[in-house]
Image (tube, rainbow, N blue to C red):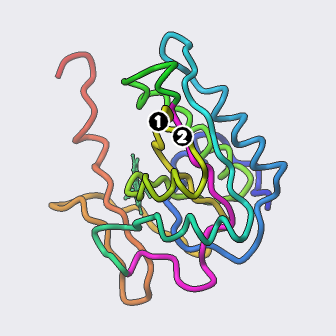
Amino acid sequence: MCQDDKSLYEIISGRRTIRRFKPEPVSRDLLERLVDAGRLAPSAANLQPLEFVVVDEEKLKAEVFPCLKWAAYIAPAGDPGPGEEPAAYIVTLANTKVREKMFEYDVGAAMENMILAALAEGVGSCWLLSIDRDRLRAALGVPDHYRVDSVLALGCPAEEPAAEVMGESCRYWKDAEGRLHVPKRAIKTVVHFNRF
Ligand SMILES: Cc1cc2nc3c(=O)[nH]c(=O)nc-3n(C[C@H](O)[C@H](O)[C@H](O)COP(=O)(O)O)c2cc1C
């Protein structure tokens, strides 16, 4: 599963959301290290309201999958096909007794840490917010005072989406061969040195 030695910048710039996966497992050891990467992320006031549910059991994975909505711009063409489902999930929860609101920044930092740590070992991922939270809460037995925030779907990539320089539209698309293309704003349209 290990990639060639890549710098962190190369991992960041080569990262694309993956929604089609090979039928290969992600080891429990790696999943634990990914949670560790999430746990160690920056946290506002260091309150650390986040907890993580790792799902790698076949029966439970089959219950999580129908809770997820994939690639809204091209649905259903962005759904993982049969045999392309994620190998595991990490569901990120926020304990609202620790922090009632504004935990989303912590979630963002933790998710990106996990995404990059996974990719450094060749594991692709999709961060999902379009999820059926009530159904997931019931499936995973999450207590009421936890917000079910995000799902990270994980597995060995079975696709190679390409980044494109964005023109008029931010909508990603699939070409005739089924390859996903993802528009990204050009750097000169987003950077301001010293003054706006
Ligand atoms: C906060 C957040 C929520 C997202 N939710 C979903 C989702 O529910 N379903 C999905 O398929 N992709 C989701 N994505 C992935 C985005 O669609 C993806 O990041 C975007 O199209 C850019 O592609 P890239 O990640 O390859 O750069 C989400 C990404 C972020 C940051």
Residue 92 placement (x, y as % from top left): 55, 42
Determine whether, in the image, residue 80 is placed left or right of residue 124: left
**Residue at mark 2:** 112
Using the image, determine if residue 120 lies above or below residue 17: above
- The residue lying toward the viewer, choosing from 10 and 73, is 73
Residue drawn at x 53%, y 83% is: 81
Would you say 135 lies left or right of 84 here? left
Q: Quadrant of residue 183?
A: bottom left
Residue 143 in percent (x, y) is at 55, 39
> How crowded is the residue under tag 2: few (<14 C-alpha within 10 Å), some, or many (20+)?
some
Name which residue type carries label 1.
Gly
Q: Are marks 1 and 2 in contact (CB under 8 Å)?
A: yes
Locate ligand 1 by image quadrant: bottom left
| Cα distance between the residues tagged 1 and 2 | 6 Å
The answer to if 88 sits in the magenta stretch is yes
What residue is rendered at 40% in x and 22% in y?
100
Asked if the beta carbon under badge 1 is closer than 8 A to the nearest atom of ligand 1, the reply is yes
* Quadrant location, the C terminus: top left
Give the main secondary structure of the magenta stretch. Answer: loop
